[in-house]
Image (spheres, coloured by chain):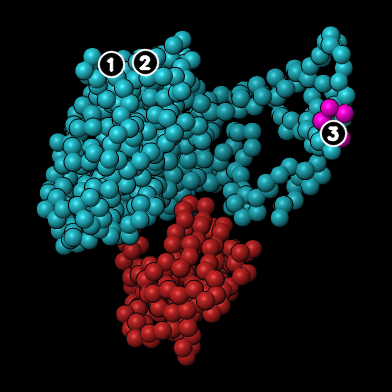
Chain colours: A red, B cyan
Amino acid sequence: MYPSDYRYTKEHEWIKVEGSLGTVGITDYAQHELGDVVFVELPKVGAKFAAGKAFGTVESVKAVSEIYSPASGEVTEVNASLANEPEKINKDPHGAAWMIKIKLSNAQELAVLMDAAAYEAYIAEKQKEASA
Amino acid sequence: MTDRIRKAGRHTSQSEGLIFEKSVPDKRGMELPPLDVPAVDARQALGAAYLRDTLEGFPEVSEVEVMRHYTRLSTWNYAIDLGMYPLGSCTMKYNPRVNEYVARLDGIATEHPYQPVELSQGCLRILDTLQNCLVEVTGMDACTLQPASGAHGELTGLLLIRAYLENQGNPRKKVLIPDSAHGTNPATAAIAGYAVENIRSDANGQIDVARLREIVNEDVAGLMVTNPSTVGVFEQHIAEIAQILHAKGALLYMDGANMNALAGIARPGDFGVDVMHLNLHKTYSTPHGGGGPGAGPVVVKKLLEPFLPVPVIAHQSDGRLTLDFNRPKTLGRMRAFYGNFGVLVRALAYALAYGPGIRQASEDAVLNANYIRKHLEDLFDLPYKFPSMHEVVFSDARQKKNGVSTTDIAKRLIDYGFHPYTTAFPLIVHGALMIEPTESESREECDLFIHAMRSIAEEAATNPELVKTAPHTTRVGRLDEVGAARKPILRWTPKATTEAAD
């Protein structure tokens, strides 16, 4: 379910690192919790974000949520197709619905993120809490 | 299945298109009498360039067609005058008719804000008396009636905190907000120039006091707390929370959205609150905004009084009232004139009609919520077991096992003749069903609601499809809410009525 080469945040974003570039999106758990996504607001190329800072918002029929950057860096590419097809986020959150690519400014930050196994344990705990 | 539905029965209401679809060229709504003055050629008088011959797309219909069109549409509405809104004071609570009667009295309805102060003594007395009522009920020291809504009141309150801290020499950097807060709170803090730091609730839906003690420092301007919180639970440690903040020079802001559970019973001024707003539509039964006029008065402790918006009402030595603009430390104006006067009149009418009886209103609101909780808690999951105040929050955890969500239950409730409760809020409860009956509902109406909810819980267990595809008895069934949000059709055009507009 959760790609083993991605890293994950507690706020349910993922990042896939290739060299000094990171691709960022939200997790399957996040899209499931949000419900049908109807609108996404993403930054412009060139915008800079620190790790943990909001870089955009995702709006579903239930709520508007901020999306936080898993790492610090500068936006090099934005997935413009999400503007017209926000439903991609529900269909393929780990693939076609990537949101931004960033040039990482501090690769060390990635060490604090969870790997797939840790993230799966983390959301299992969340689900247990929710149904307790 | 329909015999299970006690409150609602079948009723024929006529189908209705848009008024534009009724248009017939050259049809007139009214006939004007023949001219009894010489005709003027508008083309000549105004210049041909300024004359318009046609109004494109304007419906051409007769008077009776207009009357019937809007009257028919009005019969499709659900209204507080028809039945209960289980989403309570947040959206629609009963407004006693005495409020409306008083607001329409000659001499109140016809006053003008540009009237000189000498001729406005009655209006000023109304405002002054309402301020005194609000100050007394909240246990605070002073009041401004200017803010035009609850969120506007929040902003006023935060700007007061900022003005006070700036006057001390340091406006500070951040505002703390619990995760059980209203969504407007973080937005307000940001608009007031503060960074927002969230505090998680503990397992009982309470602010984590130990955590608060760790993070309050000289950078913290204040804490915004909703009490009772959005899960309908009273903050048990509110006095201690106030002490922790005050010890570091920070202030306590209370979102008074849920004051209708406390009025006449507990006073925020007594448990350490420095500044708060009141939603008059919630606690004082004024009409709801929905884009119309609202009122979100702010009450403060003495330390914030010098910073209140101008003008403030002042008492002259001869007993007359005046407007004082000479307030050197004021944060300025928050709104033109003196707030939404007509709404404030209604609030005073309610306050004076009930007087100390406002305690009874709070008690009845709490009693109704707990009555419903008691009769539903065996069938619906209750995430926070603390005593409920004016509202009770269930989750759909048990129904979800059959694929039935809070939205589905809410839709099915429409078939039973009720307006839905608040769905999926507060966010800290997964799949929330937030139910607030308010003080106005009789036991009989609460019983009908309980019966409907119990019946739906049974349907969710035995026939989940029925609930998941509800409503079934309405003019239109389940709407495509996702499609409407993703590809909204914002303008009607004669041909392309089914295609999405760009």
**Image location of residue B383, percent across then percent down:** 29, 49
Q: How far apart are labels 3 and 1 at the CA level? A: 55 Å
- Up the image or down, A117 lies above or below B121; here it is below
- Give me the residue at 15% from left, 39% from top: B271
- Up the image or down, B175 lies above or below A115; here it is above
Q: Which SS type dominates the magenta stretch?
A: helix
Q: Name the kind of residue labelled 1 in the image.
A: Arg
Name the N-terminal-most of marks 3 and 1: 3
Q: Given the image, what chain letter belongs to the residue carrying mark 3?
A: B
| Viewer-proximal residue among B197 and B468 | B197
Q: Which residue is mark 1?
A: B320
Q: Name the kind of residue labelled 2 in the image.
A: Glu
Q: Can residue B315 be seen?
A: yes
Q: How far apart are labels 2 and 1 at the CA level? A: 9 Å
Q: Which residue is mark 2?
A: B118
Residue B47 colored magenta?
yes
| Viewer-proximal residue among B230 and B413 | B230
**Image location of residue B327, percent across then percent down:** 28, 36
- Give me the residue at 64% from left, 63% from top: A84
What SS does tag 3 mark?
loop
Say which quadrant the C terminus of chain B sits in.
bottom right
What SS does tag 2 mark?
helix
Task: Please report contact status of discs 2 and 1: CB closer than 8 Å, yes or no.
Answer: yes
Q: Name the kind of residue labelled 3 in the image.
A: Gly
Q: Which residue is mark 3?
A: B47
Co-location on one chain, circles 3 and 2: yes
Q: Given the image, what chain letter belongs to the residue carrying mark 2?
A: B
Q: Given the image, what chain letter belongs to the residue carrying mark 1?
A: B
Q: How many marks?
A: 3
Side of B423 relative to A42 (left or right): left
